[in-house]
Image (spheres, grey):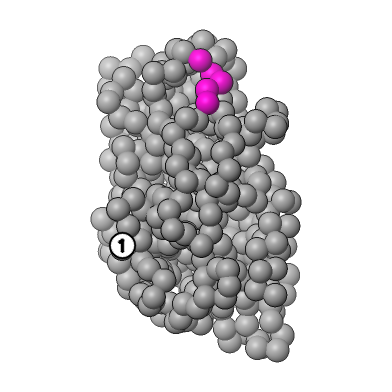
Amino acid sequence: MRRNILYLLITLCAYLPVIAQKNSVKVPHIKTLQVKANGNWDVPPVIRLNSPDVIEISFDELTHEYHRYTYKITHCNADWTPSDLFDTDYLQGFNDNVIEDCQNSLNTTMLYTHYRFHLPNDEAQLLISGNYMVSIYGEEDDENPVAQACFSVIEPQVGISAQVSSNTDIDTNESHQQVSFTVSYPGMNVTSPQAEFKARIYQNMRIDNCVSDVQPTYLQPGQMQFVHNRKLIFPAGNEYRRFEIFNMHYGYQDVEQIQFFNPYYHATLYPDMPRTNYSYDEDQNGHYFIRYDMAQDNDTEADYLFVHFTLEEFEAPLPNGNFYLNGEFTYGEFTPEYALAYNEQNHRYEGVQLLKQGVYNWLYLFVPDGASIGETAPAAGNFYETENEYLILVYHRPFGGRYDKLVGMNRIKEGVCHN
């Protein structure tokens, strides 16, 4: 029965839709897709144009058999639709390259092969800034990718000053946070800033509540101000829940027990309950990183295990929607694989994920039927003290331009200004 859980997850994963603007895994045997800038798991996947910076893309295939994987690079607009460019406009080299760096896992119950490559490299150099999507293909199908990885290249041309305040245009020190920022572009030849610049604002790198259609409140020579804009008000949420599994012998943060049911390990987390107060924790704002405390190489020696989640104290399922796990490891997808099922006997929501050893952050988001934005209130509440991370990206396309350049970035992590 325990073994059937793997086949259940595989069946669900087969129905995942394509999410164009974010990392996405489309087949069940690919796991732990990661995109890192300069080897750092805790920063946005953004590198500087014409610099020594590198993007590392890696994933695991759940087998020890070698399979030939290739990748293709697509330049994208600010909204992650493909830009109207030829390969030679944004790429020097080849655009159909083989992933040659692969290693089998060592002493793991779940056999896997770890694949990895870097960009730029000797075969492919990036010529312009903007958004890039990397499509990964198996040898048996060169039209339907098994995974997609996204990153950005920046050529800094504007300055961005920003702040986050709990004194918002709808409440003060209660349940929301408001982002304000100023974009300065002295020396740039800009005819119509409202038309030429585009801004995207992320809260904890979530894609469901990303703000992308915001217009400046005030215009001055060489400067745009985005203040008192209701589109930049975010529910504050609560700190992410977090668990740590560094080995299979005993649990760390939030792990109740680890058991071996032949042939795989299972970790049961302590039951969670809806939060009614702010709960401080030094979380990683949705990120995760892989770690096995006895490993010399975490990428190939960390094992996989089934992690069991429970959200308790619901006498009946909430109507007109469902709870989903949300974090970097879910790729921002509200799909059956990450949905929780309601257990009528125990009056709780339950879910299982096949995950690699390490530290994980997650939220329980409630998604109303027909909606595309998850709600933090039902499981976490919304508290102004929450230390969220906001990322502001600014793109520029001059009149007559054929693509969106990424010209500015600001990442706010220091906390919230309370007035």
Q: Residue at image x 40%, y 49%?
A: 299
The quarter of the picture where residue 342 lies is bottom right
Q: Which SS does the magenta portion mostly show?
A: loop
Name the quarter where the N terminus is drawn. bottom right
Question: How many numbered marks appear?
Answer: 1
Say left or right for 162 vs 315. left
Query: In front here: 365 or 295?
Result: 295
Say left or right for 7 vs 94. right
What is the x, y in percent for residue 269?
48, 77
What is the x, y in percent for residue 104?
47, 46
Q: Residue 186 magenta-drawn?
A: no
Characterize the local packing of mark 1: few (<14), some (14-19) or many (20 or more) Cα atoms within 10 angstroms.
few
Say left or right for 74 vs 339. left
The quarter of the picture where residue 188 lies is top left
What is the x, y in percent for residue 165?
33, 58
Is residue 106 in view?
yes
Residue that carries the numbered disc 1 in the rendered image:
294
What is the x, y in percent for residue 354?
56, 62
Name the quarter where the C terminus is drawn. bottom left
The quarter of the picture where residue 127 lies is top left
Q: Which residues are magenta?
A: 94-98
Q: Residue at image x 31%, y 37%?
A: 38
- Depicted 339 relative to depicted 193: above or below: below
Q: Residue at image x 47%, y 64%?
A: 362
Q: Amino acid at mark 1?
A: Met
Q: Residue at image x 62%, y 61%?
A: 338
- Depicted 352 relative to depicted 344: above or below: above
Question: Secondary structure beneath disc 1?
Answer: loop
Is residue 229 in view?
no
- Depicted 279 relative to depicted 118: above or below: below
Query: In front here: 230 or 354?
Result: 354
